[in-house]
Amino acid sequence: MHCHLGSQITEVTPYLDAVRVMVDVLTHIRNRTGRVPPELDLVGGHGIAYRPNDPALDVAQLARAARRELQECCERAGLPVPHLSVEPGRALVGPAGVVLYRVAAVKRTRNRTSVVVDGGMSDNPRPALYGAQYHLLAVPAAGAYQLSMSSNYNAVPRPAVVAVRDGEARLLVRRETLDDLARREVGR
């Protein structure tokens, strides 16, 4: 059984709620078929810190609490305890990436400082789509969604992806060019 919880969950409680719901589903399956799926997979949701002091999910606490809840619920339902998997997704790849922007302009008013950068909707639609906020112009925790959500919005070519390890840089995905975009045009 596979259950996707959602996104950016930083507390254990939603996982425990999902365990209870899924044990009800397992009970229903057993009652209708006589079989119980051998694995329960809770996917999605691992919250990570995007800014200083943002909450993040305590994985050790989650493991203890989810396992205990699953055992207790299965015991009450008379079910064998399935193998429990929790897929961390964003918690693994999010912190592995950093996006670097160049500052094009800075505008200061009495109440706010605005910074214009060489990026935006094409390389990171998260702020516009659902209000994601970041703290620096070297945006941390960008490994999970930056590349996968990038696009050619407003005909802006996608940026390169570079791996850096021990002071050595290696190009993984080359920067998209205007020629790349034009190559797809057939109406010339």
Image (tube, rainbow, N blue to C red):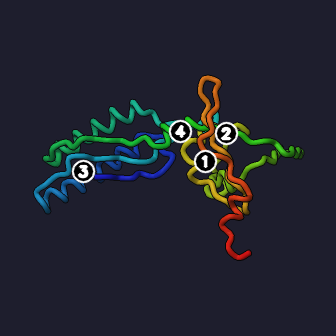
> Callout 3: few (<14), some (14-19), or many (20+) C-alpha neighbours within 10 Å?
many
Give residue 48's mark.
4
Question: Is 155 positioned to the left or the right of 74 in the image?
Answer: right
- Gap between marks 2 and 4 measured at Cα: 13 Å
> Callout 2: few (<14), some (14-19), or many (20+) C-alpha neighbours within 10 Å?
some
Check the picture and name the quadrant holding the C terminus. Answer: bottom right
Question: Could you tell me which secondary element the residue under label 1 belongs to?
Answer: loop
- Gap between marks 2 and 1 measured at Cα: 10 Å
Question: Is 146 positioned to the left or the right of 103 in the image?
Answer: left
View extreme (bottom): residue: 187
- Gap between marks 1 and 3 measured at Cα: 35 Å
Question: Is 96 positioned to the left or the right of 99 in the image?
Answer: left
Q: Which is more N-terminal, label 4 or label 1?
A: 4
Name the residue tied to disc 1.
146
Closer to the eye: label 2 or 1: 1
Name the residue tied to disc 3.
23
Q: Choose between 23 and 177: the one closer to the eye.
A: 177
Closer to the eye: label 1 or 3: 1
Name the residue tied to disc 2.
139
- Gap between marks 2 and 3 measured at Cα: 39 Å
Closer to the eye: label 1 or 4: 1
View extreme (left): residue: 34
Q: Which is more N-terminal, label 4 or label 3?
A: 3
- Gap between marks 1 and 4 measured at Cα: 15 Å
Q: Choose between 182 and 141: the one closer to the eye.
A: 182
Q: Amino acid at mark 3?
A: Val
Q: Amino acid at mark 2?
A: Val
